[in-house]
Structures are given as C-alpha cells and as structure tokens.
Amino acid sequence: MLSNLLNIPFSEWLPSPDVVIFSVTVITLLSLLMLPISVVVASYCVYTATLRRTKKEKWARNPSSLEPKQIGMYDEGMAWHEKNKEYMHEVHIKNNGLNLYGEYYDFGCDRCVMILSGRTESLRYGYYFAIPYSEIGFNILVVDPRAHGNSDGEFNTIGFEESGDALAWADFIHGKYGMDTIIFHGICIGAAGGMYAITSESCPDYIKGMVVEGMFANFGESMKNHLIERKKPVIFVYSMINFWMKHYTGHTMDKGPIDVIHKMDKPLLMLHSKEDAYSTPEYAQRLYDMCPSQNKALVWHEHGEHSMLRPTDTEKYDTAIKNFIAENFSSNKVS
C-alpha cells in the first residue's frame, strides 16, 4: 500500500485550483473576522482596566503599586496626615445613591480647598497636594472619588458624574462647617470634574475659583496619546473603548473641559508641563486662551511628567499657588 502511494506523481498530491482558492478564501475571511473580535476584546480589557472598578481592592486607599516618584509623593503626604491627624474629621455624604467618604482637616480657617484627585487616586494621594494650602490658612477636604477608596461606585466617568459629587461635597462643607470660600484643586480627571462643576448653572457663589494640574481638553485625546505610546491601532481600539464608555456610563470621551471652559468666569490657575505626553501643551494653551476669566494664569513647567509637577519643582509649584491665592483671595503676595 505504501509503495503504491509513493509511486503517485507529486503533482497529483497537490489540491486542485478550486480547493486552493476555497481554502485561501476561508482563511482570509476567518482572519478578517478575528481582527474585529480581537479589537473588541482588547478594547473591553483596556476600558475595564482603566475606568472600571471590578473589586473593592482596586483603587483602594492603600495603593497596590506606585512608581518611584509617586512613592515619594505618597510618603510625604502621609507624613503631613500624621502631623495633622488631630484636626481631621471623617466625613460622609450620599450623592446619586452612592456613599462617598472623605476627611476634613479643620485648622480653624474661614476658607477651604477641596482636592480632586486623578484616576486611580484615593484621598490619601490627595494629602500631598494639600500641603501648600495648609501653609497659607486653608482648611482641607480630601475625598475618595466614586469607585475609589472607601466610596461606592463601579465606574470612573472621567469627571462627568464626579462633578456632581464635587458640588455635593461643597454643599456639605458650606452647610456643616460654614465655609463661604471654597476652591478646587484638580489633577487630571479631577481637574475635568472640577471644571464641569464650577461652570455648571448650579454652581454656588461660595465656590470661588480653581487650580488645575494637567487638565486635558477631552479624555479622548489623552487616551489616544496613551495608545500611540503603546503602539496600538488608535482608530479602531479608541472607537471601541469609547463605545464601552458610552455603553456603561452614557458619556463620551470626545467631550471634555474644552466644551465648557468658555463659561469659566472665576479665578483660574493652570499648572502644566511642557513635557506632558497625555494632556499635551498645545491643548493646555488652547484651553487657557478660551477661558474668559479676567483672573487667570498659566504657569508652565519646563519638565515634569503628567500629574507629577509638584515633585519636579516643588518651590515653583507652591509659589504659583500661593501667589494665585494672594492675588485673588487676600492682599499678601508671596515672593
């Protein structure tokens, strides 16, 4: 039997042209089918990893991992907290059915700053940014954003729903502690949420102004820059990530502070790095130019990663804040 097979000419072993064409067609169709499936799966994984809290341990108050520079920021913030624990009150509100938790540091001042942290960052990360304000006569409110720390929630909505939380916290601090001067200090997504809040029709007069670091024009631009950095197919993957965003939260990454900053008429300080790869400098300048406030400033840092300006040049960062406060909320300018 084997000898008979070996005597068959090699050409007769080859499939007919029709079989070859059919096989190539099937393989091509399967490959084309697998490409969109892989994009759907990859985009879902990216969305879930970056904007969805799948378990309580995710984005907890004790961070599971930090970059070396973040460790220094976190440790310095924790040292500030330990030094000021006697002034701290644990606070809680409910908004949109979610239990939200925070800490209020009452130094006996007549004004308060609310630290609005970025993505993955709980109130403990906010301690670090409270330091310059506590040095110039501010009470401090640090909060666990929804889906972070001890607060309820499953989704980070890139500032949209968080803006309502910020207004609810401000109402609480105003009512319970009599704060008639409240300002926001927002980092990245926290900056976006603060901008939506302070430009909303329901923003009260006692929210007086805002400091932002690394504010993006819209989160979609930042996401695209992340994908470019990771050499991913931007158009297909981004479109699907945005699809999941809309599906779960009703919001789109194509909207952002750039759509509302034309209504910002209160004092604004923008802190931004010329090396920011995600919230790019050209968009920061565009946001600043679009803001109609008569009391605004844009302070550029030559160096610094996204959301990490203060450790890069602490003196410049803190002095910019103190001057902004002095120029808009008191008469003493810091040299």
Image (cartoon, rainbow, N blue to C red):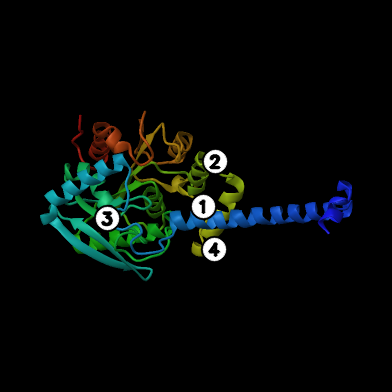
Q: Which residue is mark 4?
A: 247
Q: Which residue is mark 1?
A: 253
- Marks 1 and 2: CB-CB under 8 Å? no
Mark 4: secondary structure: helix
- Marks 4 and 1: CB-CB under 8 Å? no
Q: Name which of mark 2 and mark 4 comes first in the sequence.
A: 2
- Asked if one can make out residue 314 in the rendered structure from this viewpoint, the answer is yes
Is residue 90 or residue 109 the one in the foreground? Answer: 90
Q: Which residue is mark 3?
A: 62
Give the Cα separation between the discs numbered 1 and 2.
20 Å
Classed neighbour count for the residue bearing mark 4: other residues with Cα under 10 Å, few (<14), some (14–19), many (≥20)? few
Q: Which dot, 2 or 4, sits closer to the camera?
A: 2
The amino acid marked with disc number 3 is: Asn
The amino acid marked with disc number 1 is: Met
Image position, residue 262 (x, y; %): 46, 45
Image position, residue 77 (x, y; %): 21, 46
The amino acid marked with disc number 2 is: Lys
Q: Which residue is mark 2?
A: 231
Q: Name which of mark 3 and mark 4 comes first in the sequence.
A: 3
Q: Name which of mark 1 and mark 2 comes first in the sequence.
A: 2
The amino acid marked with disc number 4 is: His
